[in-house]
Image (tube, rainbow, N blue to C red):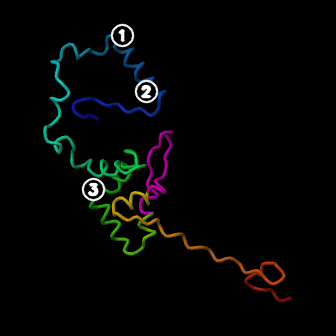
Amino acid sequence: MFRDNIPVYHTVNIRDTFEFIHHLATEMTLGKLERTADHMERTKYTDNIQMSRKGNLPPDRGIEMQLACIPGISAKMARSVEDQYPNMMALCAAYQALGDDERAKHMLLADLKFRGTSGKDQRLASRSSKIYQYVTGTAADPPPKPKKQKKKATTDGTVSPKKRIKL
C-alpha cells in the first residue's frame, strides 16, 4: 500500500516484522536489492502533500477515517465496517431500514469481524452500540434483552412442571 509515495508494509506481529527486516538486510547484503535512494533525487515529504486537505484523503476511505475517530474504535474495526458499508450513507440507510427496533440498530454491526492485535478474528460486539450512538447522535444505551420467564414455584418450594402426568 502506498501513502504519499511512501511504501508501507504490514506485518502481523513483532516476529513477522523481525523476519521481514532480516530478509531485506540479507537481500541487500547479497546485492539482490538496489539502493535506489542513492540514485533518486531527494525530495521533501511536504512536496508530496497536496495543499488542499481533500487531495490527501481519497473519498473511498472516508467512512474508515470517520469511524476511527470514535473513541475505542480502531482503524481495523472501522475497515471491517467499511467492508460491509462502503460509505456513511449506506450505513445510515441500514440503520434506517431497521425502523423503530432500537435493539437491532445497536447490534447491527455486532457480528462483523476484524483481526485483533493477537492476530485472531474478533467481533465488534459491544462496539456496535458505540458506533450507532456516535453516528446517529443517540446517547441512550441499547434496550435490555427480553428476559426469559421463570418457572413458578409451588407452595412447597418445588418447581412445578408444565404438564402434570396423571397416574
Labels 2 and 1: the sequence-earlier one: 2
Labels 2 and 3: the sequence-earlier one: 2
| Labels 2 & 3 near each other (Cβ < 8 A) | no
Amino acid on which the number 3 mark rests in the picture: Asn
The magenta segment is 107-127
Residue 155: give x, y in percent of width and height. 81, 84
Amino acid on which the number 1 mark rests in the picture: Thr
Q: Nearer the viewer, mark 1 or mark 3?
A: 3
Describe residue 15's horizontal placement relative to residue 157 as left or right. left
Residue drawn at 33 percent across, 60 percent down: 135
Residue sitting at the far front: 139
Residue 146 located within the stretch drawn in magenta? no
Q: Residues within 10 Å of mark 1 (few under 14, many from 20)?
A: few
Labels 1 and 3: the sequence-earlier one: 1
Residue drawn at 56 percent across, 73 percent down: 146
Residue 125 located within the stretch drawn in magenta? yes
**Tally of numbered discs:** 3
Residue hosting label 3: 87
The numbered mark at residue 29 is 1
Q: Quadrant location of the N terminus?
A: top left
Residue hosting label 2: 17
Provide the secondary structure element on which disc 3 rests.
Answer: loop
Magenta stretch, main secondary structure class: loop
Amino acid on which the number 2 mark rests in the picture: Thr
Q: CA distance from mark 2 to mark 3?
A: 32 Å
Q: Nearer the viewer, mark 2 or mark 1?
A: 2
